Image (spheres, rainbow, N blue to C red):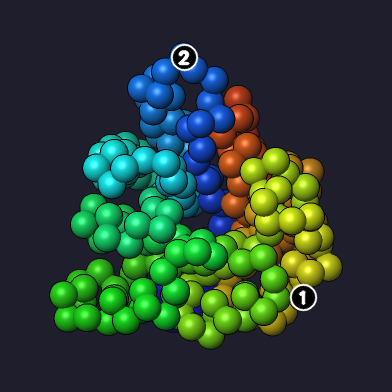
Amino acid sequence: MSHRGKTFPSPILCYVTDRKSLASVSDAVRRESLLKRITGAAAAGVDWIQLREKDLTAKEFSSLAREALAQTGRANRRGFPTQILLNDRLDIALSERAAGVHLGEKSLPVREVRKWLGAQAYRAVRGNFLVGVSCHSLESAVSAAQNGADYIFFGPVFATPSKEAFGKAQGLPLLAEICRSVSIPVLAIGGVTREDAAACLAAGAAGIAAIRLFQETAELRSLVQALRARS
């Protein structure tokens, strides 16, 4: 799939990180465990990894991004082109040369991000730099697409603890309607299991984004292969 001169894998598989959900006695150990999972995801062929660690300071987030990019860079030299996206922090994404930024409902408006990227100083990165938006309604999805988003996360499609704040599960019919209503890739997120993934793709989703699906599996490579086989 291509859009605005950018080519996307099919399906897009995105691992959204959450080190807080990793069992550990300390945050330092969780951090190392998370980096191991990021390396494993890149080696398994996951397309995108969104660093979502919202509680980190700018310095901590920059450090984590730098290490994640180094880890995936080593995996990528073995033939797996994994891209790192940063949650919310456009400044850090640009300074650390991440592949893009993912915006939430309370983040910078996507239109403002596009203005920043249009500045002369960012000419070198703006062509390939991805700007994604989390959406929880048809209206917000259409608005994001119209204002310059490259892709959308829509959810929660199914019930999931991490998305309870955004209300009840939205379901496959609304996912399908949103996919028909925008011309940019829509990734299904929220409670998506290995078994549900095929239904999301059949509804028109360009891919799957998830925390637990990718972070908790013991056989990530076989999971990625199975998800691709169902597309």
Lower position in the chain sequence, tag 1 or tag 2: 2
Q: Residue furthest bottom?
A: 146
Q: Which residue is mark 1?
A: 177
- Residue 46 higher or lower than 113, as above or below: above
Quadrant containing the C terminus is bottom right
Give the residue drawn at x 74%, y 56%: 167
Q: Which residue is mark 2?
A: 25
Label 1 – label 2 distance at C-alpha: 44 Å
Q: Is residue 112 left or right of residue 102?
A: left
Give the residue drawn at x 17%, y 81%: 120
Where residue 181 appears, as percent x and y from the top left, is 69, 82
Q: Residues within 10 Å of mark 2 (few under 14, many from 20)?
A: few
Give the residue drawn at x 77%, y 75%: 177
Judge by depth and name the residue closer to the eye, 75 or 178.
178
Q: Residues within 10 Å of mark 1 (few under 14, many from 20)?
A: few
**Circle 2 — which element?**
loop
Q: Quadrant of residue 28?
A: top left
Q: Nearer the viewer, mark 1 or mark 2?
A: 2
The kind of residue tagged 2 is Val
The kind of residue tagged 1 is Glu
Where residue 61 appears, as percent x and y from the top left, is 32, 43
Judge by depth and name the residue closer to the eye, 73 or 150.
150
- Residue 132 higher or lower than 183, as above or below: above
Quadrant containing the N terminus is bottom right
Q: How many marks?
A: 2
**Circle 1 — which element?**
helix
Q: Is residue 188 left or right of residue 3?
A: right
Where residue 200 appears, as percent x and y from the top left, is 75, 58
| Res 113 seen here | yes
